[in-house]
Amino acid sequence: MPEDTPLLMIPGPIELSPAVSAAMAGRTRGHLEPAFVSCFGKALKMMREVWLAGPDAQPFVVAGSGTLAMEITAQNLIDEGDAVVVVETGYFSERMAEILRRRGAQVSMVHAEAGDAPTTDQLRTMLATQPHPVAVFATHVDTSTGVRVDAKAIAQIANEYGAMVVLDGVCAVGGEALEMQAWGVDVALTASQKAIGLPPGLALLVASKRALARRAALQRSPSLALDFAAWQPIMQAYEAGTTSYFATPATNLVVALEVGLGELLAESNSAATAMALRLREHERAASAVRKGLSCYGLAFVPRSPELMANTLTACYLPEGIGPELVAGIAKHGVVVAGGLHPAIRTRSFRIGHMGHSSRTPQHLLRCVEAVGLALKGLGKEVDQVSASRAVLSELD
Ligand SMILES: *Cc1c(COP(=O)(O)O)cnc(C)c1O
């Protein structure tokens, strides 16, 4: 990469690995070509592995954004009047709640302030007051605060109350622990441009057998283009090595998906081991970035270390420095993101460290250095040497 090419360190889209980049640059495949059919089939099988989902779970790959994956999930699980509980951690849980309300659900929010997550007791209390809670929705990592919830505990509690469990894993799948089958998760959804490591353009989700049964029992059908029932035969056909058509898949992205998922799983024949290694890589990257930023005296938005995500870091802006810091960092060649959560939008900024960058020490170092240079440019005294040393020592 030439020195003057900006380095993309926002919480999605992210820098691509060379192999995914090369896959994207290939010729456009027809969606009925045998080589493409085989590629799509392999990608679907690998999704079950990356999600650690059961053999009866159904992966779906649909052209679109993470928000579309949220919409597909709501449309296929929810009927008019259903009681649902949303675990509130920030911007994206509020979006999920709005999607659910528009589908006619009665939404109860389990509240937490920006930077915090609701406790499991709060969730239990809320579920206990619902006559028939249909589902619990949680944002695995909220990209507006960098807060990660305890998805396993949430799933366990939801299951105790007979409710389905949905994880918005858009900023989590591939970078945080996920054991869809073992935890009893019904839908785990993401998008291609986050820790999966592709450009934007694919909505990805895996649905449990219970989620598929729920769709079959709905009173009110989903919109046709979002319907599990329309897409499932297509996914099954591709996995079986035959062609089928409902709506044209994003063929270039599906080709890259096979490569990207292959990279996630490459380190071991056991999916669980491979994903544990990816998790470890993200933990180290997150820790390196945070150790570095701590040397500048920056404070993090999540209120305690166990709430801090592996995939991104949200920091408060230091005293006397405003959102212009983000432009200052860009001047030093690194693109980071401003605040997103309404309560702290003008007081925070965010750095993504997932996918290819999580395993590229140079990216992490360059990013922390650019933050230091920008702080210095705005008149703050910073110890750049200690920060760089802290990053590298974490990555040794
Ligand atoms: C990025 C993100 C989304 C939205 O994805 P889009 O592709 O922008 O629609 C939803 N939820 C979370 C947690 C995200 O990080």
Image: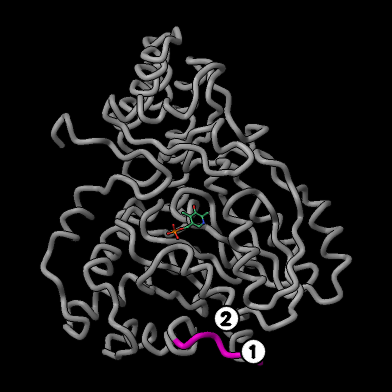
User: Seen in the image, is 241 located left or right of residue 30?
Assistant: right
As drawn, 239 above or below 190: below
Residue 383's disc number = none
| Residue type highlighted by circle 2 | Asn
| Residue type highlighted by circle 1 | Leu
Q: From the viewer's side, name the closer residue of 279 and 22.
A: 22
> Where residue 292 appears, x then y in whole percent?
45, 21
Q: Secondary structure at mark 1?
A: loop
Query: Does the beta carbon of the residue at mark 1 sit less than 8 Å from ligand 1?
Result: no
Is most of the magenta stretch helix, strand or loop? Answer: loop
> Where residue 336 appears, x then y in whole percent?
39, 36
Q: Secondary structure at mark 2?
A: helix
Query: Does the beta carbon of the residue at mark 2 sit less than 8 Å from ligand 1?
Result: no
In the rendered image, the quadrant that contains the N terminus is: top left
Say few, some or many: other residues with alpha carbon within 10 Å of mark 1 (under 14 / 14 to 19 / 20 or more): some
Residue 221 shown in magenta: yes
| Disc 1 and disc 2 in contact, CB within 8 angstroms | yes
Q: From the viewer's side, name the closer residue of 306 and 112.
A: 112
Residue 76's disc number = 2
Question: Tag count in the figure?
Answer: 2
Residue 218's disc number = 1
Say few, some or many: other residues with alpha carbon within 10 Å of mark 2 (under 14 / 14 to 19 / 20 or more): many
- Res. 137 image quadrant: bottom right
Residue 321 shown in magenta: no
> Where residue 126 appears, x then y in whole percent?
83, 60
Q: Earlier in the sequence, mark 1 or mark 2?
A: 2
In the rendered image, the quadrant that contains the C terminus is: top left
- Res. 337 image quadrant: top left
User: Where are the magenta residues, as a range?
Assistant: 219-224
Residue at 69% over, 53% down: 88
